Amino acid sequence: MKIHEHQAKQLMAARGIQVPLGRVARSVDEAVAAVRPLIQESGSPVVVLKAQIHAGGRGKGHFKEYPDVRGVNVITDGIEGGPSAAEERVRELAQQMLGSTLVTIQTGEEGKKVNRLYLEQGVDIARELYLAVLLDRSVSRNIVMASTEGGVEIEKVAEETPEKIIRAEIDPAIGLAAFQANELAHGLGLEAEAAKNFRRFVVALANAATELDTDLVEINPLVVTTDGQVLALDGKMAFDDNALYRHPDISEMRDETEEDPLEIAAKNAGLNYIKLDGTIGCMVNGAGLAMATMDTIKHVGGEPANFLDVGGGATEEQVTTAFQIITKDPNVEGIFVNIFGGIMRCDVIATGIVEAVKRVGLEVPLVVRLEGTNVEKGKEIIEQSGLEVTNADDLKDGAEKILELAGRS
Ligand code: ADP
Ligand code: MG
């Protein structure tokens, strides 16, 4: 699960990690009302208005409706005009940003609708660095990744100048050690006050990552101010979904408007669904069989439209929801149902499929492969249903059949 920048910063601040002062706003009026207190509290006449979406690249991104407006706006009107000038500019920008669609390098062309804004104190930036804590599966540990190249995409740095990325493994028993924090500070060329602040920052960040069960914490940029402060100017956090039960406060931060509506529907029905880019919708029971089905579709030259595991004891309700989800994806040109009747008997599943198809309707070809207990009875039910459903004998046969039928339609 991902959260917004303002939420990540709130979690960081609560753990002693330095972030700029800021306020979240869900309406134009809230954004305007945040200006004066922020200027007073921070002592800086500069404020920054930032679109909150679950994607980066906002600073260089633009709005579909207002091509000249960026996703991150540094507002300097307050320097000469005072707080009321800053307020006016914030009002104008917030009106344009809220409800509009922001397109960045990470959102893809369709962009993301902006529903909330974050107003932040303007920070005097001396240096922009990169800092992240991420799960390195090859060592089964969190690692710290840092670079002097902040504010640019880290993938680019990794490709073009990999020597500029430094790493440190976090020992789960002792956290990030002082000598490691030292080495990182040194590697980033930090000295005196800035080095001291950085060491404290990175140790606290490593602890937060462990405590919060994050998959990724990325701060790009981490900034050093002209007076040696070290602050998280941006904040991205993603959590291990399997650990969310330990963090009810974080679960509450979920913003469903940022997530795929089909994936939410699937989750609510207890289905494991991940949308992919292909054209063959798959409905399978068991994660292993689902993977094997996707592999086989690829093997015969097709592309799966999704991963969908209806579980070992799928109910008729779940099968119906699964059909609804698959058929709502406009890319789907054919559906392949591949079910092994173990816990569940094939005749029960076949009845479920027939009922689901009757309820949901079918506009694309459907191939069903059943195997296991009562398979003959199951096939009979499908054949006698009068629906246009093709039976398949085995996995490869089914994959080939659906590909052929989908290609024809
Ligand atoms: P994104 O990564 O989505 O583009 P960032 O939060 O990294 O968004 O902001 C982009 C750039 O905007 C930063 O690299 C920084 O130069 C500038 N910026 C962001 N927040 C502030 C701030 N509070 N004060 C000054 N500059 C900022
Ligand atoms: Mg950034």
Image (cartoon, rainbow, N blue to C red):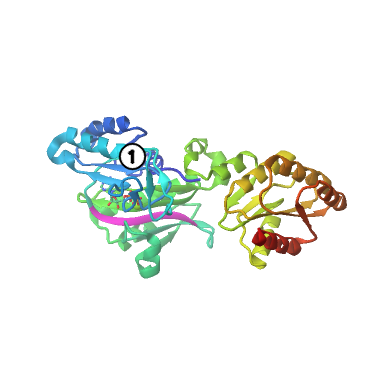
Magenta stretch, overall SS = strand
Number of numbered callouts drawn: 1
Could you say where residue 369 lies in the image, as x and y percent from the top left?
A: 77, 56
Of residues 196 and 132, the one nearer the viewer is: 132
Side of 89 where 241 appears, left or right: right
Query: Which residue sits furthest left?
Result: 80
Could you say where residue 127 lies in the image, as x and y percent from the top left?
A: 25, 56
Instruction: Report whether the residue tagged 1 is closer than 8 Å to ligand 1.
Output: no
Side of 169 where 383 appears, left or right: right
Q: What residue sits right under mark 1 in the picture? A: 118
Of residues 200 and 89, the one nearer the viewer is: 89
Q: Can you tell which quarter of the image residue 263 is in?
A: top right
Magenta stretch: residue 128 in it?
A: yes
Q: Residues within 10 Å of mark 1 (few under 14, many from 20)?
A: many
Q: Can you tell which quarter of the image residue 400 is in?
A: bottom right
- What span is colored magenta in the figure? 126-135
Of residues 363 and 133, the one nearer the viewer is: 363
Residue 177 visible in the snapshot: no
Magenta stretch: residue 173 in it?
A: no
Q: Which residue is rendered at x = 87% and y = 53% of the image?
A: 376
